[in-house]
Image (tube, rainbow, N blue to C red):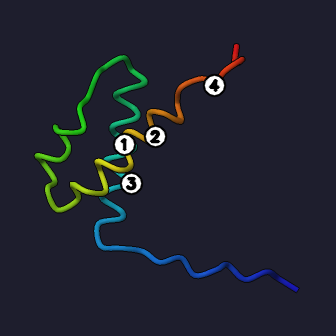
Amino acid sequence: MSESTPDVATQPGDELLLELADDYLRRSRAGEQPTVDEYVSKHPELAYRIRELFPAMIAMEQPGPGAT
């Protein structure tokens, strides 16, 4: 029997937010220092979500204690 995929609630702007998040991380990994405000000013309709998501992504990119 195959497992069903649970329904995931999506919000307007999810695809754009994903594209922006990918761009933000790509630029950060390349040594640039993009700012959250830069993205918020270009996409004010996603401001709250950008301000919540982008710093969390950067925090997850940082090595944890004891990482080599």
Q: Name the residue under label 4.
A: 64
Query: Measured from the top left, where is residue 37 in percent x and y?
Result: 17, 39
- At 82% across and 82% down in the image, what residue appears? 2
Q: Within 10 Å of the Cα at label 4, are there few (<14), some (14-19), or many (20+) other Cα atoms? A: few
Q: Residue furthest top?
A: 68
Q: Within 10 Å of the Cα at label 1, are there few (<14), some (14-19), or many (20+) other Cα atoms? A: many
- The CA distance from mark 1 to mark 2 is 5 Å
| Marks 1 & 2, CB-CB < 8 Å contact | yes
Residue type for callout 3: Leu
Q: Mark 3 points at which residue?
A: 18
- The CA distance from mark 4 to mark 3 is 25 Å
- The CA distance from mark 2 to mark 3 is 12 Å
Secondary structure beneath dot 3 equals: helix
Q: Quadrant of residue 30?
A: top left
In primary-sequence order, the first of circles 2 and 3 is: 3
| Marks 2 & 3, CB-CB < 8 Å contact | no
In primary-sequence order, the first of circles 1 and 3 is: 3
Q: Residue furthest left?
A: 41
Q: Mark 1 points at which residue?
A: 54
Secondary structure beneath dot 2 equals: helix
- At 70% across and 13% down in the image, what residue appears? 68
53 vs 16, left or right, is: right
62 vs 36, left or right, is: right
